[in-house]
Image (tube, rainbow, N blue to C red):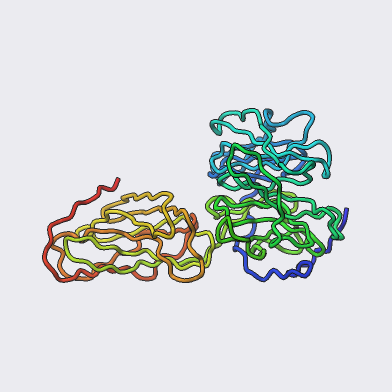
Amino acid sequence: MKVYCLCFILVFAGVAYSQTGPQFGPPSAAGRVIADPPTGGVVSPTFSEDELEIIFESLGTIWRAQRESTSVPFENPAPIPELNAADFSEERPFLTPDGLGLYFMRSKGGFFASRKLYYAHRWSPSLSFLTPKEVGIEGVERFNGALGSVSADELTAFLEIVQPDSSSTLPNQTDIALATRSDVSEKFGMWKFLPEISTDNYERGPSIYRDDRNLYFSAVGVGVPGFIYWSVREDKHSPFSPPALVQGINSGGVVNRDPFIAFPGSRLYYVRNNELVFSNRILTATYKIGEGQGLSGRRVRVPIIMNTPEPDAILFDVPVFFNPNLLTLERVIPAPSLGEESVEITLLSQGRYRILYQSQNPLLGDGSDEKVFDLECLINSGTPPSQIAIASGGTFRLNRITVSPPAESGRVVVEQGPNYPPASIIKIR
């Protein structure tokens, strides 16, 4: 076994990593993620979207455990009998976002063994998996690598591959590659390297976030004991950015590996010195309530604005309050560039609402003001010309993480004009 120096450096084999990655806090002090992990350790942990189920590998066997809340550890992990064959090693599981599909590798013997990618389906998280079927990798006689993760649409597999004819001084250099298919009924085709994030170090455990843009992975090399990196791309057809060191969790005295970023990017699970831990995300973001103008008896739109450098802002939790005698909230209109995954409007009390909006696309995250959505309100008939404040109504969150509330209230400027009759009102449930 090769022993690497544990000094902390940021220049890897001539490639400088200067971009700043996402910020996380230290490993949680809440204790173990798994109360009683198997003696063989934890490899390639993957979680359900609610983080109440974990599936992982331990010594060539796939295990599973559940819990009632994210505030308590998983207990009593056990092998999944329908997935583990007596004459194979089952490795590197990855759970689909809906929790119903599992991808994993099967091999016979050792690091250099030929491996095949399998998929198993279940009809419910409470039911057993059906018989696994082989889904690749096609186009190569012997696939010498391992699964990292699969995109949310299940059309791209992110892999770690032993570099053919590598000139590296490392014994078993691995690089990140991907294999694609055009439909889930097909097998994954021949893999190809991602040159923009490949260096002379090991790049291992590529974990793609469900947006198919944000990629986390670990790197091991001379002077690099095990650091976790991040890279992002504009869309799934674009190249990834140069890798950046994830902030807050890497240091020269620890070995980090096997990252898994939980939805919606608020928590990072990873193996630290052979123990599964997690760190909570630290976000930089500011909400603003904009200004609208309208006539009494007519509708007005008031923008909710965000300023953030984060590349994955998609879940917006916005509590607002205004005088119900003056304004009636009718609907939320997402910014066209963001799209709409879901919008929930909850009436908490008279004039006080909580709006939970999940976008299809993230904000640009370039540090400029960006509109998230418009509050379309009815200026109640008979409201006199004035300025009506729309205020913060509670705790503002981004990606389930608390951020600072707006520094100022928004305004609706009621213009002088005829006293129009009330427009139709959409009932909010």
Q: Nearer the viewer, residue 146 or 266?
A: 146
Q: In which image quadrant can residue 107 be found?
A: top right
Q: Which of 165 and 267 is in front in this view?
A: 165
At 65% from the left and 28% from the top, the residue drawn is 131
Whole-percent x and y of residue 205?
70, 51
At 40% from the left and 61% from the top, the residue drawn is 372
At 61% from the left and 54% from the top, the residue drawn is 268
Q: Which of 260 and 395 is in front in this view?
A: 260
| Position above or below: 406 against 351 | below
Whole-percent x and y of residue 391?
32, 64
At 60% from the left and 63% from the top, the residue drawn is 23
Q: Is residue 397 visible?
A: yes
Whole-percent x and y of residue 100?
56, 36
Q: Is residue 37 visible?
A: no
Name the side, left or right, on which 46 lies relative to 322. right
Q: In which image quadrant can residue 17 be found?
A: bottom right
| Position above or below: 287 against 38 | below
Quarter of the image with the C terminus is top left
Whole-percent x and y of residue 428?
28, 48
